[in-house]
């Protein structure tokens, strides 16, 4: 409207004012739904709160490049994070993988996640496997000032070490279990008499299952698999000077279908669903009456119940405790959809998408990646591009280097 009034300068001032006012009214009307939507998101924003959140970061480039999935994909050295029961169906006798993920690379260069994982098949029929992983999340160097006015430097970090066992229960199904030790030192509790505050320890376990079959579609043999993993079932973590926090207990359910495109060319499509099995923290606004006053007593009681509930009870409560009812429970489910193309298990191209509700964290991003494999070593790389809020991993490259024990053994044998 303003463009039209500027073209016809012969119009009266009243007409121009009317046209300008109409344009402003149109802009306000267009912006109103956006503002209302933003207010609704702000009022209903209620993410599930946990401690040691670094346990939920995908450690390897392969899973990350497909939108953070791996519950039912082909087993590899990093299955300890996604679904350890897959190790029983691994093609190789063993493998070790080292992964590196920078964090907030646009701002700093000393925050990162490093992960070491591997497995080894055991038993006369290779139907069992033992596995282990070590992850270390460094938050870099943080400078602070103590009560006495002395400048101090701390290096907060989180780490976890776990060991696992998986076994085939039939020709198509396996299960696995993992036991994990967790240590978190985020610098809480620092004082003038203690420049190195003590961290907090926790213990947890994972339970998983994996099923794979090979249906014939047309004249081609395909592969269909599905798997599930309940991770971080354990104690609470209690940093010094802070209330106890739930571990990020997570239920992951996934399926994957791989079919041949031509000789040596295969394509796999995979889907993962995730839900944190952690009770929702009460919000003060949920205890307002019709007059807008907060029932402080009821809120304090609900908060105390949330802080003192046991982790196991919290797992069952997490399915029905959201203030928004079933609608909000569905918002707590995130999904990943990804694809992986491989040529003769030597060259790989991957892509995927991860989506989390805008009311539960609003993490939404695409993942892209590629991999190249020789007899002994495989190199995978992943790149993430956020589509919603800015992510600490937005426009970041991560890498995984995997060493195959069968290939290494063959190489040593040929040299002898």
Image (tube, grey):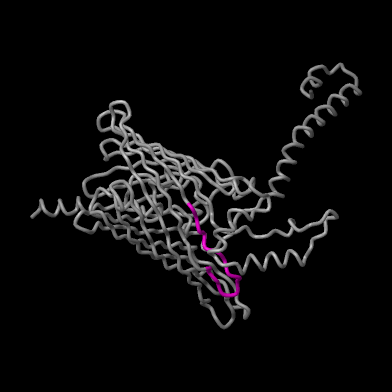
Between 285 and 365, the one nearer to me in the picture: 285
User: Range of the magenta residues?
Assistant: 236-251
In the picture as drawn, the residue positioned furthest to the left comes out as: 416
In the picture as drawn, the residue positioned furthest to the bottom comes out as: 193
Between 182 and 402, the one nearer to me in the picture: 182
Q: Residue at 85%, 29% (x, y): give it.
A: 21
The answer to whether residue 238 is magenta is: yes
Q: Residue at 89%, 21% (x, y): give it.
A: 15
Query: Does 387 sit above or below residue 103?
Result: above
Q: Quadrant of residue 13?
A: top right
Between 378 and 355, the one nearer to me in the picture: 355
Q: Residue at 43%, 50% (x, y): give it.
A: 228
Query: Does 356 sit above or below residue 57?
Result: above
Residue 264 percent across, percent down from the top left: 25, 33
Q: Quadrant of the C terminus?
A: bottom left
Residue 267 percent across, percent down from the top left: 35, 34
Query: Does 412 sit above or below residue 14?
Result: below
Q: Relative to 278, is 82 on the left or the right?
A: left
């Amino acid at each position: 409207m303003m463009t039209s009034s500027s073209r016809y300068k012969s119009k009266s001032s009243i007409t121009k004012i009317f046209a300008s006012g109409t344009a402003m009214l149109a802009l306000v009307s267009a912006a109103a739904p956006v503002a209302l939507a933003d207010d609704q998101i702000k009022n209903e924003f209620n993410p599930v709160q946990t401690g040691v959140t670094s346990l939920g970061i995908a450690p390897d480039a392969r899973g990350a490049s497909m939108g953070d999935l791996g519950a039912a994909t082909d087993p590899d050295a990093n299955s300890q994070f996604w679904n350890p029961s897959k190790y029983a169906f691994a093609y190789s006798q063993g493998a070790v993988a080292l992964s590196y993920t920078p964090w907030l690379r646009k701002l700093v260069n000393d925050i990162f996640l490093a992960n070491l994982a591997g497995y080894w098949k055991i038993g006369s029929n290779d139907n069992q496997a033992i596995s282990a992983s070590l992850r270390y999340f460094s938050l870099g160097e943080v400078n602070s000032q103590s009560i006495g006015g002395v400048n101090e430097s701390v290096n907060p970090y989180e780490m976890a070490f776990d060991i696992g066992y998986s076994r085939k229960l039939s020709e198509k199904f396996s299960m696995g279990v993992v036991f994990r030790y967790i240590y978190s030192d985020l610098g809480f509790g620092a004082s003038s008499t203690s420049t190195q505050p003590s961290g907090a320890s926790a213990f947890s376990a994972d339970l998983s299952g994996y099923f794979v079959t090979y249906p014939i579609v047309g004249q081609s043999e395909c592969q269909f698999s599905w798997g599930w993993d309940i991770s971080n079932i354990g104690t609470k973590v209690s940093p010094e000077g802070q209330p106890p926090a739930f571990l990020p207990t997570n239920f992951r359910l996934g399926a994957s279908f791989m079919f041949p495109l031509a000789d040596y060319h295969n394509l796999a499509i995979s889907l993962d669903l995730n839900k944190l099995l952690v009770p929702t923290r009460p919000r003060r606004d949920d205890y307002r009456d019709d007059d807008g006053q907060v029932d402080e007593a009821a809120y304090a009681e609900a908060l105390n119940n949330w802080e003192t509930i046991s982790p196991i009870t919290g797992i069952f409560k997490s399915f029905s405790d959201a203030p928004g009812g079933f609608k909000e429970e569905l918002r707590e489910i995130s999904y990943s959809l990804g694809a992986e193309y491989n040529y003769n298990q030597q060259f790989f191209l991957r892509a995927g998408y991860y989506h989390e509700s805008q009311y539960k964290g609003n993490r939404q991003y695409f993942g892209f990646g590629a991999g190249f494999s020789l007899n002994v070593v495989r190199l995978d790389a992943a790149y993430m591009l956020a589509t919603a809020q800015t992510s600490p991993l937005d426009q970041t490259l991560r890498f995984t280097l995997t060493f195959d024990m069968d290939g290494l053994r063959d190489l040593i044998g040929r040299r002898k």
